[in-house]
Image (cartoon, rainbow, N blue to C red):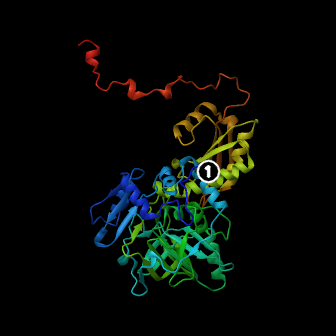
Amino acid sequence: MSRKPTAPGSRRDMDLRQWLGHLETTDRLAVTKTGRKLAFEIAGLANRHDGSRALVAPAPDGHAGGVVISGLLSRREWMAEALGVEPGTLLSAFEEAAQSPLPVNEVKTAPCQEVVHKHDIDLTAMLPIPTHNEHDSGAYITAGLMICRNPRTGIQNVAIHRLQVSGPRELGALLLPRHTLSFFTTAEEAGDDLEVAIVIGASPACLLASQAIVPMDFDELTVAGALGGAPLDVVRGISVDLFVPAQSEIVIEGRCRANLRRPEGPFGEFPQYYGERADRHVIEVSCVTTRQKPLFHTIVGGGLEHLILGGIPREATILKTLQDMFSCVRDVHLAPGGTCRYHLYVKIKARHAGEAKNVLLGAFAAHYDIKHAIVVDEDVDIHDPEMVEWAVATRFQADRDLVVISGSQGSKLDPSSDNGFGAKMGLDATVPLDAPEFRFKRIRVPGEQELDLDAVIDPDAKLASLLGS
């Protein structure tokens, strides 16, 4: 695994501001004119630059000191770069960090608490919070890391949940059936609220770590520490007993209220459809802390940054799960066309007849979100959708190579399912082991990749002179 050397006590990854500076020096930063509109315009600009440049929008809608940033990690290569690893080792680096976490390091003072607001809190007046899509119910915090504790054990959890600004100091939260909801349910059954801290403007390592698929009672901030090669500095909240990343930009502290639900949504989600409106959990804000001039990070729903942040940790977990079961598995990829959730490509070196179909069954068990899986041979680049499609076109027969599983659990955000209840489909697009050698031998021009085009192409040649006219 190729990584930058790490001095004792230092981190090899970049924090948010270092990463922005690096993007600027490498011509991957688009800075808008001041005064862009928080409703739709910033999201539209972020989408127009998606995958090519990150966006910085200073002083939007009269927020003189406010700066909105987006699209910071909209390519896999950028995430690897921010963490100080090679792109080809990104999954193994993430899985290594999840397997070998580093305890956090508590500090007494931190940049994220340079400014403290306890009274007269009005979130939209204080912070430049955008509205993204046409039918969104209003402004949303979309890149906030929600930190809470297990009421039974005291161990923290970190996750990203969509947060609707419902009032000056109130947020509506969609809590899906995962760790945060489990902790809240435990607190609510005891008649208690659940303390939360929402961190905006976290480092790339913290953002990625928040999406780790880990067991209950596993603080994802320890994964962020391991990703950077040194314990992550954290500071205790002002009004809540929670630790937050010290270098973050903004922290919103409060309580998820027991026995209280209010309307939340609709909101444009990662499948590029709207999550419907319903009565959902309510967070009452008690304190807001920021840097002197904070950056407000927003993730546009369904954009590459949204998809990649969720996709990379899933890939790492799925790869390890499959490799633990099948020695033939070489790599996996959650395709952006499948929202980095629903379509999985698996590369194998098959040794036994029927092995690819077993891998397909293992893939569906590895994560319930996977809806369609395709298994291909080693000669197929699973990061190139055209190559995967070629393998299906030339190596797959539906009556022989198709696996369909009805009545299974999937994503509740898949609009084609019945609240997550649906079917899964697997395609074995590998070459049969007993096939004659030349039936599936790919054509190849010897020496093609070694040709130096700059040395042999004449950029000044004109066709007319070659034809004698």
Seen in the picture, residue 375 relative to 61 is either above or below; the reply is above
- The answer to whether residue 186 of the structure is visible from this angle is yes
Q: Give the residue type that dot 1 points to.
A: Lys
Q: Position of residue 448 (x, y in %)?
A: 50, 25
Seen in the picture, residue 434 relative to 189 is either above or below; the reply is above
* Viewer-nearest residue: 112 or 75: 112
Query: In the figure, is residue 70 to the left or right of 315?
Result: left
Query: In the figure, is residue 376 to the left or right of 5?
Result: right
Query: In the figure, is residue 421 to the left or right of 199?
Result: right
* Viewer-nearest residue: 145 or 224: 224
Secondary structure at numbered mark 1:
loop
Dividing the picture into quarters, in which one does residue 166 lie?
bottom left
Task: Characterize the local packing of mark 1: few (<14), some (14-19) or many (20 or more) Cα atoms within 10 angstroms.
Answer: many
Quadrant (top left/top right/bottom left/bottom right) for the C terminus: top left
Q: Position of residue 217 (x, y in %)?
A: 67, 71
Which residue is the extreme one toward the front?
7
Residue for point 42% across, 51% down? 51
Dividing the picture into quarters, in which one does residue 32 lie?
bottom left
Which residue is the extreme one toward the top?
468
Q: Position of residue 460 (x, y in %)?
A: 28, 25
- The answer to whether residue 416 of the structure is visible from this angle is no
Residue for point 66% across, 82% down? 189
| Residue behind mark 1 | 371
Which residue is the extreme one toward the bottom?
119
Q: Position of residue 176 (x, y in %)?
A: 59, 67
Seen in the picture, residue 214 relative to 365 is either above or below; the reply is below
